[in-house]
Image: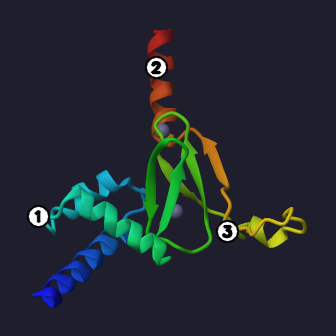
Amino acid sequence: MAIEKRRRNTQQRKIIQEELCALKTHPTAAELFEIVRRRLPRVSLGTVYRNLEVLHQDGRILKLEMGGAEAKFDGDTRLHHHVRCTECGAVRDVEMSEPIDPSANISDSCGFDIQGYTLKFMGTCPSCRESAGNTDKNLSH
Ligand SMILES: [Zn+2]
Ligand SMILES: [Zn+2]
């Protein structure tokens, strides 16, 4: 019985990770839940949350803290950076020929044991720019 439950949990976690990795949109737990439930009709939002935390702690996915807003998740654990839309909050990957690793250049960390860093670009995403453009056009008519 206990083994059966554990096996099901592992299977659930695998599907959650698979679905996250298939996305480029950096979903919140709630957004991923909507997708995952197509394959796991009986899964709860709480289960998705818990599994995302476990995957994050295992270093198999990234958790992007959004400073107040709901955290987003990323199945791509390679070193890469993100840009966040200041209008709609969408998060996309930034393509860089050579991603910067700020922690590689620390010379004096004031005795801190550095565990991580945040590097986030901000801007306006194409669809927000487009709708802003449309509004301008409407105004000029
Ligand atoms: Zn936007
Ligand atoms: Zn990413």
- Type of amino acid under label 1: Pro
Q: What residue is pinned by disc 1?
A: 41
**Given contact means CB atoms under 8 Å apart, are the residues at marks 2 and 1 in contact?**
no
Across and down, in percent, residue 9 comes to: 22, 78
Q: What residue is pinned by disc 3?
A: 115
What is the secondary structure assignment of the residue under circle 3? loop
Q: Is residue 114 above or below residue 26?
A: below
Badge 3 or badge 2: first in the primary sequence: 3
- Type of amino acid under label 3: Gln
Q: Is residue 16 above or below residue 129?
A: below
Q: Quadrant of residue 51?
A: bottom left
Residue 135: assigned label: 2
User: From the viewer's perspective, is the residue at label 3 or at label 1 nearer?
Assistant: 3
> What quarter of the picture does the N terminus occupy?
bottom left
Badge 2 or badge 1: first in the primary sequence: 1
Depth check: 15 or 68 in front? 68
In the image, 49: left or right of 80?
left
The CA distance from mark 2 to mark 1 is 41 Å
**Which residue does the image show at 32% across and 60% down from the upper left?**
49
Residues packed near mark 2 inside 10 Å, few (<14), some (14 to 19) or many (20 plus): few
Depth check: 12 or 85 in front? 12
What is the secondary structure assignment of the residue under circle 1? loop
**Which residue does the image show at 31% across and 52% down from the upper left?**
31
Depth check: 134 or 101 in front? 101
Depth check: 133 or 41 in front? 41
> What quarter of the picture does the C terminus occupy?
top left
